[in-house]
C-alpha cells in the first residue's frame, strides 16, 4: 500500500472513507472488504492483528473492522494499539466466540470500550454500523438512496 490508486481504488473513490478489515480467516476478510467496496468505501484487508497495525500506518483508515479472536495479537489488542496511535480512527469488532465477552470486559476495565458485532455479520447490518460509526454516507450511497423507488 503505497498511497497510490491501486486495483481497488478508482479515482472516484479517492475521497471515500478508508476502511481496514482485519481477520485471520481470509475468506471472511475478503468478503467483508468486497461488501464495503460495493457500497463505495475504499477497503483493504490484513490477515492478522500485527499486519493490521502495520497497514494502518500506510493506509490511514477512518475505520478498522476486526475479528476479536485471532492467533498472535487479538483484535482487542490491535484495537487498543490502533486507538493509541491513531485516536481518530473508529473501531468495530466482531466475533463468533463466547470467550469474547471476557476479553471485552478486560479491555473495558482498562479504559478501552469497543462496539461488538456477532458473527456471522449480515451485510446490511455491517453497512448500517459502518455508516453510523463513520457518520456520513459516501456519494455512491447517496445516489443509490435517491434513485431507490
Image: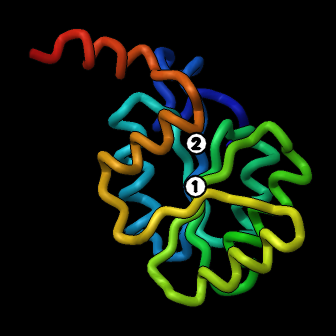
* Label 2: element kind: strand
Q: Are marks 2 and 1 in contact (CB under 8 Å)?
A: yes
* Label 1: element kind: strand
**Would you name the residue on which mark 2 appears?**
19
From this view, report whether residue 40 is shown above or below residue 43.
above
Q: Earlier in the sequence, mark 2 or mark 1?
A: 2
Q: Tell me which residue sits at (44%, 50%) in the image.
A: 33
Q: Tell me which residue sits at (56%, 48%) in the image.
A: 44
**Would you name the residue on which mark 1 appears?**
65
Residue 22 visible, this orientation: no
Q: Which mark is residue 39?
A: none
Gap in angstroms between the C-alphas marked 2 and 1: 7 Å
Residue 149, x across and y down, in percent: 9, 15
Residue 35, x across and y down, in percent: 35, 46
From this view, report whether residue 66 is shown above or below residue 127.
below
Q: How would you rate the neighbour count of disc 2 (Cα within 10 Å): few for under 14, some for 14-19, many for 20 or more?
A: many
Q: Tell me which residue sits at (52%, 66%) in the image.
A: 94
Quadrant for the N terminus, please: top right
Side (left or right) of 91 relative to 135: right
Amino acid at each position: 500500500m503505497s498511497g497510490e490508486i491501486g486495483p481497488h481504488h478508482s479515482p472516484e473513490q479517492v475521497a471515500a472513507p478508508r476502511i481496514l478489515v482485519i481477520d485471520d480467516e481470509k475468506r471472511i476478510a475478503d468478503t467483508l472488504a468486497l461488501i464495503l467496496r460495493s457500497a463505495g468505501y475504499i477497503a483493504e484487508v490484513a490477515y492478522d492483528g500485527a499486519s493490521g497495525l502495520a497497514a494502518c500506518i500506510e493506509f490511514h483508515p477512518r475505520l478498522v473492522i476486526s475479528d476479536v479472536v485471532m492467533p498472535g495479537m487479538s483484535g482487542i489488542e490491535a484495537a487498543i494499539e490502533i486507538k493509541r496511535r491513531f485516536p481518530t480512527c473508529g473501531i468495530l469488532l466482531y466475533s463468533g466466540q463466547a470467550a469474547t465477552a471476557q476479553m471485552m470486559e478486560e479491555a473495558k476495565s482498562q479504559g478501552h470500550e469497543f462496539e461488538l458485532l456477532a458473527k456471522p455479520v449480515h451485510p446490511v447490518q455491517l453497512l448500517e454500523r459502518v455508516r453510523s460509526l463513520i457518520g456520513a454516507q459516501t456519494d455512491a450511497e447517496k445516489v443509490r438512496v435517491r434513485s431507490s423507488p
